[in-house]
Amino acid sequence: MKSSKILLSIYIIASILVVIAVFMDMYWLEYFLKPMILPALFFHYVISPKKHISFVVILLLLLNYTSDMFAISKYLYKGDVVIAMNFLGNAILTYFFVSDYWRAKNKTIKNKVFFVLFLVGFMGITFLFLTLIPNLNTWKLFYYIIYGLLLSIMATVTIQTYSITNAIRSFYAVIISIAFVITDTFYVIYNFYMPMKVFLVFNLAAQFGSYYYLMNYFTVNDSLTDTKNG
């Protein structure tokens, strides 16, 4: 139990210090600490009592870890690799989030209307941010539209599932999806519109924080009991 808390502390402290390091241009500290973040969180759950780590969790962590390591590398096409890793991870998560939505009971016409409105709203935001990215060829435009659609579906289904069930699992899913939307939003703003360090800080803070809730989502009781209606 003590070792588990130490590992969780390492995850939190390393995440905070990496955010500070990026803001202060102390990239040597980022190179040293960033590789610790996900392993510390992973082993925190491995040694925690009554926590089952599935293959899906390991796969998602590997994808995120690979993305993080490429992000601090000097590889010429690292941006494309990071986006590809994130897209694959988001696709896997979306499968589980959509499954949760279909398993949720007591969906009403109102829920379905809000589902459509949320999806249209998120897609509208996606197209708005696509206009900030210069020199998009047809392939990249198509790729970013699919990426944005995936994020929009992810955010929509998690918000709707939580509004129906009030379940803790769906609450974690909402935090994850919102964190991913925030991360990608500030990524676009920082890289293509306004390269202010504060946007990069928000990007990293949301990303690192999402890892904790990602682990909680997959290790919490798999119940989606509708707590609003008994």
Image (cartoon, rainbow, N blue to C red):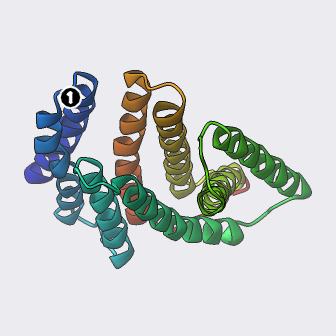
Residue that appears at 72% across and 45% down? 127
Would you identify the image quadrant in which residue 103 lies? bottom right
Residue that appears at 66% across and 60% down? 138
Residue 32 location (% of width, % of height): 10, 43
Residue type, label 1:
Ala
Residue that appears at 52% across and 53% down? 168
Foreground residue, 189 or 210?
Answer: 189
What SS does tag 1 mark?
A: helix
Q: Quadrant of the N terminus?
A: bottom left
Q: Residue furthest right?
A: 109
Number of marks: 1
Foreground residue, 15 or 8?
Answer: 15
Residue 18 location (% of width, % of height): 22, 35
Residue 96 location (% of width, % of height): 55, 69
Residue 24 location (% of width, % of height): 22, 21
Left or right: residue 171 versus residue 32 is right
Foreground residue, 15 or 78?
Answer: 78
Regarding residue 168, the answer to whether it shows in the image is yes
Regarding residue 220, the answer to whether it shows in the image is no
Would you identify the image quadrant in which residue 206 lies? top left
Q: Is residue 191 above or below residue 144?
A: above
Q: Quadrant of the C terminus?
A: bottom right
Foreground residue, 121 or 197?
Answer: 197
Left or right: residue 47 versus residue 62 is left
Q: Which residue is mark 1?
A: 21
Q: Residue furthest bottom?
A: 55
Residue that appears at 59% across and 58% down? 140
Left or right: residue 103 versus residue 40 is right
User: Within 10 Å of the Cα at label 1, are there few (<14), some (14-19), or many (20+) other Cα atoms?
Assistant: some
